[in-house]
Amino acid sequence: MGSPGGAAGAPKAWGTVRRNGSGALAFHGLVLVFLLAPLVVVVLVSFTDRGYLALPFGGASGGASLRWWRAIGQNVQFVESFGTSVKLAAVSATLSAAMAVPASLAIARHRFPGRAALVAGLASPLMLPHVVLGVAMLQFAAGLGLAGSWAGLLAAHLVVVTPYMVRLLCAGLAGMDARLERAAEGLGASGWTAFRRITLPLLAPGLAGGWVLAFITSFDELTVSLFLASPAHTPLAVRLFTHIDQMTDPLVASVSAALIVVTILALAVLDRFYPIDRLLTGERRG
Amino acid sequence: MIRPALLAGPAVLTYALVLALPLGALLLLSLHGYDPTRGALPGWTVENYADLLTDGLFGEALARTFRVSAGVTLICLVVGVPEAWVIHRMRPAWRGVMLLLVLGPLLVSVVVRTFGWMVLLGTGGLVNQALLALGLPGAPYRMLFTEGAIVLGLVHVMLPLMVLAVWASLGRLDPSLPRAAEGLGAGPLTVFRRVVLPQLMPGVLGGTVMVFCLSASAFATPAILGGKRLKVVTTMAYNEFLNTLNWPLGAAIAALLLVAVLGTVALWARLAERPALRRLGAP
């Protein structure tokens, strides 16, 4: 990756004069191996033909098969939990968008007392330990007779995903020319029309990025769900965690590998309209 | 004044109902006694907190939580800050790809990633198989269900977050500064240490407190890689709530964790972040 290529001797194209030395690149390589090794290993192990965790090659440790991938479909509990997680993630991301869009408009377009507190408050679930959120919501839901209910699970996820939604929406609004809205209103559009015809279309990339990020966050969430799940509503992460707690068979590997594949596919689709590195770094589009 | 209130209303109400009220109720619950047959008792008391402060098991879990979080933070600093700088110095095309590879794991469930470490670290796991093949004395080693395994698993979760925190500061770095230093004959390490690093301090300090607090709050990784015996504060609270069913005591553990995390954030902002910003010339 250090080859000069066509841009040899043109350092202006990027930040600094000197390229990364071989030491820096070796260091970077080790970091990548460390970060990707557990994911690669999970995918490899999912193709074993044995009844225990083994690589699908290397003679003594067995061969390759799709046995454990087929086993996912035969496991009613995992299939059911997958459905629960998808529904939970889609509904919480959508409801989160519904309340985060107006809240982000208030933050981005208005100056009012308590604005800083609102920004900090909306972001607070990022800093609060999820175990604390989980136990707090469990005992509160239990007091209301909602422990283990769909409503309790949904409410919890709504709060957990909203900080991501607000962050991307605020970034989108900050990168937008507010004069366009004012021009529309000046030309006689009502506030609602200006929002619907001007703001919302311009906000679409941020909204879509926020929705996907919220969906993934909800789908991956374990700790809060662990306290609020019930046999009728068990998200996939909870199902996987309790399964690992009892035994570690290659089925965990194939389900995990399927989750990795689904994540990669979702990101590939998302990347078409919202560059993923910007989604993650929170940098503005453009 | 009315318009922002209306706009933010739904979100504020939802947060109040789902977040603020339950947290308040949790603090109240921690002030009740507990009886195994009758559940939470009506009278007010601070005995849960008194019990925790004198309980050897909780002290051990607290010490372990602190040790693990400090270790994870240190490793993330030493690896994550240079890593962000290395990626930043790449050409834009490579930069996007590498950033994606480093940050992408953030979007994969922590359960999945932790399971990957289980496969790698088990007694019959791949790391031990490799060590055996190399003929290392004493192999296979017991690596799973140790504090080291918890630290390793948590570094895997937190390292991308540290890179992300530093990345924001790198975007604000004036590229002519390192260029000038190099022009004046400074080597790459000197440029990084004397010119780049001081400019990155806001991101580094923000990342530090974030990684420390998230490590102390982490549940899945210590629960899976620490096994049943090595308890941290979060797994202890979980245990009280879902196994022992002593909810008031579990609430007290959760309340202590909450106060510790919020206190750390506030104290860090006062003692480390504000002075650092002032040194960079912020008002």
Image (tube, coloured by chain):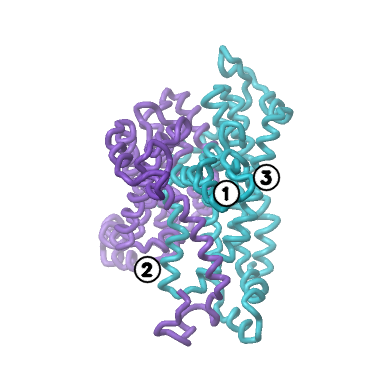
Chain colours: A purple, B cyan
The secondary element bearing badge 3 is classed as helix
Name the residue that disc number 3 marks. Answer: B67
Question: How many labels, in total?
Answer: 3
Residue furthest to the right: B54
Q: Indicate left or right for B276 with B10 as reference.
A: right
Q: Amino acid at mark 1?
A: Leu
User: Which numbered dot is residue A177?
Assistant: 2
Residue at x-position 66% and y-position 40%: B64
Give the chain letter at badge 3: B
In depth, the one of B48 and A268 nearer the eye is: A268
Question: Dot 3, how many residues are within 10 Å of its Cα: few (below 14), some (14-19), or many (20+)?
Answer: some
If the image is split into quadrants, where does the C terminus of chain A sit? bottom left
In depth, the one of A221 and A96 nearer the eye is: A221
Question: Which quadrant of the figure has residue A237?
Answer: top left
If the image is split into quadrants, where does the N terminus of chain A sit? bottom left
The secondary element bearing badge 2 is classed as loop
Q: Are marks 3 and 1 on the same chain?
A: yes
Name the residue that disc number 1 marks. Answer: B152
Give the foreground label among 3 and 2: 3
User: Residue B175, image x and y in percent?
Assistant: 55, 78
Q: Indicate left or right for A71 with B220 as reference.
A: left
Q: Amino acid at mark 3?
A: Arg
User: Residue B107, image x and y in percent?
Assistant: 42, 51
Question: Dot 2, how many residues are within 10 Å of its Cα: few (below 14), some (14-19), or many (20+)?
Answer: few
